[in-house]
């Protein structure tokens, strides 16, 4: 069976800035941080850290109270993003004659319904309840988001979730891409969502000593990838979705095409649970380029994994230098987690959207707050202010996860 081209016809997210998709990308290109300061009322010790929240997101308003009440917050983000991407693709929410039996969902989440389970623990241990809501299991299950998306949009094909730490939604997008390219699915909804501010989760991340410190005044600039003074990552909640569609099907219905997904590669370092390895990342990038039929000369931008950790940033730069050789010095690279934070299983989805928009609008968003460059991160062209004027043909989006799982996606601009 010949491989099909895969169009990206829908993009949707719950913006940490509170606006729509154009507003999100405009603010991102302006270098505006969405990082705020999280201070809870937990006793005896509140959570106190830089964090990206979506305070304007009201699931009861966006989804309706009956539907929202059936979901954990991570699934609410996922459903809201999927609805947004679906509407952006110009597809009716209810089938209007064409069978959707082969249309499906591939979703990424690192944590799933952790908030639902933590709520259960609080009810039992703090409030002395003897019984939990019978909805707790369906609220907490990791396939809750994709199940609801399939049900609400009437998608009868595969409905699956991928939990691969920070690479979760990259792998979900890649697997969705393969199904459309092979002809197994005509349309796939894909992306990811996570809500990491459960008390136990946030405390666990603190214990790893990879979290950037900050207070109400300094949190906005707490995440500084590639900087000599970087102190660590900043977590965030959210969700992002893409609609991937058979190219000919999209053309036949007159859909707007934002871009094309052309390659996907994934590897495992198989060496350490939390320390990344250059060789594994290099293999993932090479596999993606080969899968896409692209050369290193075709790549005009890389959206880096760039978490602002001491070990992660230099390893990623080293991998890019190994792949791109002498061309690495002129390879534009930026890490947008500096502004939208690390959404864990949802990160790759929001970064995929950023990469697609960069190609579509022909502008590279910056790495914010990058002052003095760490000498170990020298060797690529770090973008520190939005860059216009250079033709962007193809781009990569990197996602490198704990457990040694690496996933890279390749996108191409639509030829006008």
Image (cartoon, rainbow, N blue to C red):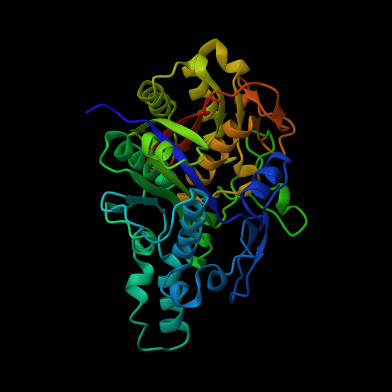
- Image side of residue 5 versus residue 40, left or right: left
| Above or below 406: residue 128 | below
Image position, residue 80 (x, y; %): 50, 61
Q: Residue at x 48, y 67 (%)?
A: 73
- Image side of residue 277 versus residue 235, left or right: left
Q: In front: 369, or 155?
A: 155
Q: In front: 295, or 276?
A: 295
- Residue farthest along the top direction in this orientation: 326
Question: In this rendering, does residue 240 appear at all?
Answer: no
Q: Residue at x 58, y 50 (%)?
A: 211
Q: Residue at x 50, y 56 (%)?
A: 81
Question: In this rendering, does residue 349 appear at all?
Answer: yes
Q: Quadrant of the N terminus?
A: top left
| Above or below 294: residue 54 | below
Residue 18: image quadrant is: bottom right
Image position, residue 7 (x, y; %): 43, 36
Image position, residue 64 (x, y; %): 50, 73
Q: Residue at x 54, y 63 (%)?
A: 197
Count of picture labels: 0
Image position, residue 275 (x, y; %): 44, 37
Q: In front: 63, or 169?
A: 63
| Above or below 271: residue 153 | below
Q: Quadrant of the C terminus?
A: top right
- Residue farthest along the left direction in this orientation: 1
| Above or below 403: residue 40 | below
């Amino acid at each position: 069976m010949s491989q099909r081209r895969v169009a990206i016809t829908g993009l949707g997210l719950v913006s940490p800035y509170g606006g729509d998709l154009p507003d999100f990308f405009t603010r991102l290109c302006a270098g505006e941080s969405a990082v705020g300061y999280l201070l809870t009322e937990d006793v005896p010790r509140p959570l106190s850290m830089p964090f990206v929240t979506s305070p304007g997101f009201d699931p009861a308003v966006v989804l309706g109270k009956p539907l929202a009440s059936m979901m954990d917050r991570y699934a609410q983000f996922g459903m809201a993003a999927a609805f947004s991407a679906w509407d952006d693709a110009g597809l009716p929410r209810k089938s209007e004659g064409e069978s959707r039996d082969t249309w499906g969902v591939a979703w990424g989440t690192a944590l799933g319904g952790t908030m639902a389970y933590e709520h259960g623990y609080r009810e039992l241990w703090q409030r002395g309840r003897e019984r939990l809501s019978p909805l707790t299991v369906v609220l907490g299950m990791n396939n809750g988001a994709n199940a609801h998306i399939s049900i609400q949009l009437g998608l009868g094909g595969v409905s699956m979730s991928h939990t691969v730490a920070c690479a979760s939604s990259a792998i979900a997008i890649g697997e969705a891409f393969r199904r459309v390219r092979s002809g197994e699915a005509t349309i796939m909804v894909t992306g990811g969502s996570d809500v990491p501010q459960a008390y136990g989760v946030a405390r666990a991340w603190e214990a790893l000593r990879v979290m950037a410190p900050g207070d109400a005044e300094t949190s906005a600039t707490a995440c500084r990838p590639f900087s000599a003074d970087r102190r660590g990552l900043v977590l965030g909640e959210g969700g992002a979705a893409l609609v991937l569609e058979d190219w000919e099907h999209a053309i036949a219905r007159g859909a707007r095409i934002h871009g094309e997904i052309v390659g996907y590669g994934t590897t495992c370092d198989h060496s350490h649970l939390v320390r990344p390895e250059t060789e594994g990342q290099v293999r993932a990038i090479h596999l993606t380029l080969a899968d896409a039929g692209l050369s290193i000369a075709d790549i005009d931008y890389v959206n880096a994994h760039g978490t602002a950790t001491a070990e992660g940033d230099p390893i990623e730069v080293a991998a890019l230098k190994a792949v791109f050789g002498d061309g690495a010095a002129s390879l534009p690279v930026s890490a947008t987690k500096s502004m939208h934070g690390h959404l864990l299983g949802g990160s790759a989805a929001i970064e995929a959207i950023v990469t697609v928009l960069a190609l579509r609008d022909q502008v590279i968003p910056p790495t914010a707050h990058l002052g003095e460059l760490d000498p170990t991160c020298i060797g690529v062209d770090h973008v520190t202010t939005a860059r216009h004027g250079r033709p962007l043909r193809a781009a990569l989006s990197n996602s490198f996860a704990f457990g040694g799982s690496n996933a890279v996606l390749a996108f191409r601009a639509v030829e006008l």
